[in-house]
Image (cartoon, helix red, strand yellow):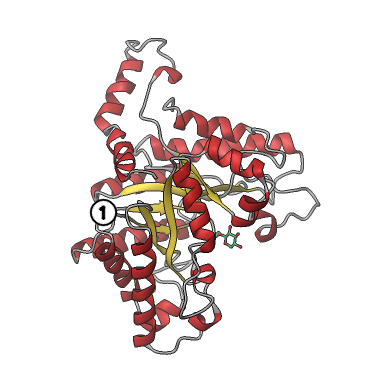
């Protein structure tokens, strides 16, 4: 079983910004051996992947890839309400327990995904009608789930995708059953309950569409910071923001915007984690070599933007191999070419994206 302090060790292993600046200054002055980019040893960043239960059960190569490439494992779907709560009165932990046991047996850390989300809900939850009912179910859910994995799942995506696609300060939240029945308080209830049940857990606000060079993404970053600031002002613990980072190959990265976001997170004393990294290549040319090169370059641009200001606590990809990915169905290509969103191809061969990620894992970037 994984010891909780192993997670703490990583956290403590993160260098301060000053140390990074010192290292960079050393390179500039030619004082670091080799004096090249690769000579700057930084603290390694743990890498991880979400594990999809069907592939996990059926494909031994998938399990081998998780063992080899991951420091962190995330049950992809098995901690969602839809998996745990088909039956309103009985929790089904079978899938989650399998992946948690695998992670523990292989000394991997775990992230829990996700305690509150407007999607992946069983029919009965979508049909809730009163505030009291929603509050009772939400609190009970978080109590049961967080308590079961207390001391084992060190980090939780407490609230997932709560921010509206085009948010405004007056209308920051997505229209979900939680927002409809509980209003903005749904976020507070979730964080407060998770903190009460496992006071040592790291609690994260997870969301997407933070990194694109468009006004909506900037608005979403502002709202995410506002939500965390309000939680902190009320004394409710929140430890970080998760950037899902489903990166659109055709859109590029707002490097300045991302870096500003990192500084604002620093100012609020919040961590950043990259939680669902993959590349949406639906608009890219079919040639697989070109697509893989473009995907690696995009991931590198994004991670460099982040890391230059703030080292993420973890970098987690949403799967490992192009053999299994939600991108195929959710962002289908017009031609018949297979999507290539992940660091390993459909036959588990390393793609250029893996080399980019491995540099962070090795502390070379
Ligand atoms: C996706 C899974 O990858 C799919 O297997 C599932 O069918 C639907 O959900 N944002 C999230 C993730 O927070 O939970 C989603 O995962 C992808 C988008």
Residue 110 visible to an observer of this rendering: yes
Q: Is residue 229 left or right of residue 89?
A: left
Task: Indicate the position of residue 209 as horizontal and vertical percent values.
Answer: 49, 56
Placement of 315 over or under 141, stated as above or below: above
Placement of 204 over or under 139, stated as above or below: above
Q: Residue at x 49, y 66 (%)?
A: 165
Q: Which quadrant of the figure has residue 7? A: top left
Q: Which quadrant of the figure has residue 188? A: bottom left
Q: Residue at x 64, y 32 (%)?
A: 350
Task: Indicate the position of residue 304 as horizontal and vertical percent values.
Answer: 45, 35
Task: Please tell me how crowded label 1 is: few (under 14), some (14-19), or many (20+) other residues with Cα within 10 Å.
Answer: some
Q: In the depicted view, which residue is nearer to us: 272 or 226?
A: 272
Q: Residue at x 51, y 31 (%)?
A: 358
Task: Indicate the position of residue 273 as horizontal and vertical percent values.
Answer: 40, 47
In which quadrant of this rendering is ligand 1 seen? bottom right
Residue 213 visible to an observer of this rendering: no
Q: Secondary structure at mark 1?
A: loop
> Total label count?
1
Q: Quadrant of the N terminus?
A: top left
Residue position marked by numbered label 1 in the rendering = 200
Q: Among all residues in the image, which is located at the extreme right? A: 336
Q: In the depicted view, which residue is nearer to us: 231 or 325?
A: 325
Task: Indicate the position of residue 28 as horizontal and vertical percent values.
Answer: 34, 16
Q: Among all residues in the image, which is located at the extreme bottom? A: 129
């Amino acid at each position: 079983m994984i010891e909780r302090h192993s997670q703490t060790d990583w956290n403590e292993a993160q260098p301060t910004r000053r140390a990074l600046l010192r290292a960079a200054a050393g390179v500039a002055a030619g004082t670091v051996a080799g004096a090249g980019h690769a000579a700057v040893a930084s603290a390694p960043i743990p890498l991880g992947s979400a594990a999809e239960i069907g592939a996990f059960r059926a494909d031994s190569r998938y399990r081998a890839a998780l063992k080899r490439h991951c420091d962190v494992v995330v049950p992809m779907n098995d901690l969602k309400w839809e998996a745990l709560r088909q039956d309103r009165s009985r929790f089904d932990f079978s899938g989650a327990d399998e992946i948690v046991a695998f992670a523990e047996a292989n000394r991997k850390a775990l992230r829990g995904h996700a305690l509150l989300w407007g999607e992946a809900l069983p029919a009965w939850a979508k049909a809730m009608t009163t505030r009291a009912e929603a509050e009772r179910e939400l609190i009970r859910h978080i109590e049961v789930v967080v308590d079961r994995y207390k001391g084992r799942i060190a980090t939780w995506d407490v609230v997932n995708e709560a921010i509206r696609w085009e948010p405004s300060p007056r209308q920051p939240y997505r229209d979900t059953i939680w927002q409809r029945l509980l209003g903005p308080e749904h976020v507070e209830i979730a964080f407060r309950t998770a903190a009460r049940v496992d006071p040592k857990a790291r609690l994260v606000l997870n969301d997407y569409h933070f990194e694109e060079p468009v006004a909506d993404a900037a608005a979403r970053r502002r709202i995410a910071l506002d939500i965390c600031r309000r939680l902190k002002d009320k004394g409710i613990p929140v430890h970080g923001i998760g950037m899902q980072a489903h990166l659109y190959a055709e859109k590029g990265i707002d490097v300045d915007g991302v870096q500003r976001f990192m500084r604002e997170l620093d100012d609020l004393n919040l961590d950043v984690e990259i939680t669902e990294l993959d590349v949406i290549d639906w608009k890219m040319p079919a040639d697989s070599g070109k697509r893989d090169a473009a995907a690696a370059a995009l991931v590198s641009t994004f991670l460099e933007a982040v890391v230059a200001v703030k080292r993420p606590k973890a970098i987690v990809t949403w799967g490992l191999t192009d053999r299994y990915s939600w991108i195929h169905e959710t962002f289908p290509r017009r031609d018949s070419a297979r999507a290539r969103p992940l660091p390993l191809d459909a036959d588990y061969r390393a793609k250029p994206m893996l080399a980019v990620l491995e540099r962070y894992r090795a502390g070379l970037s």
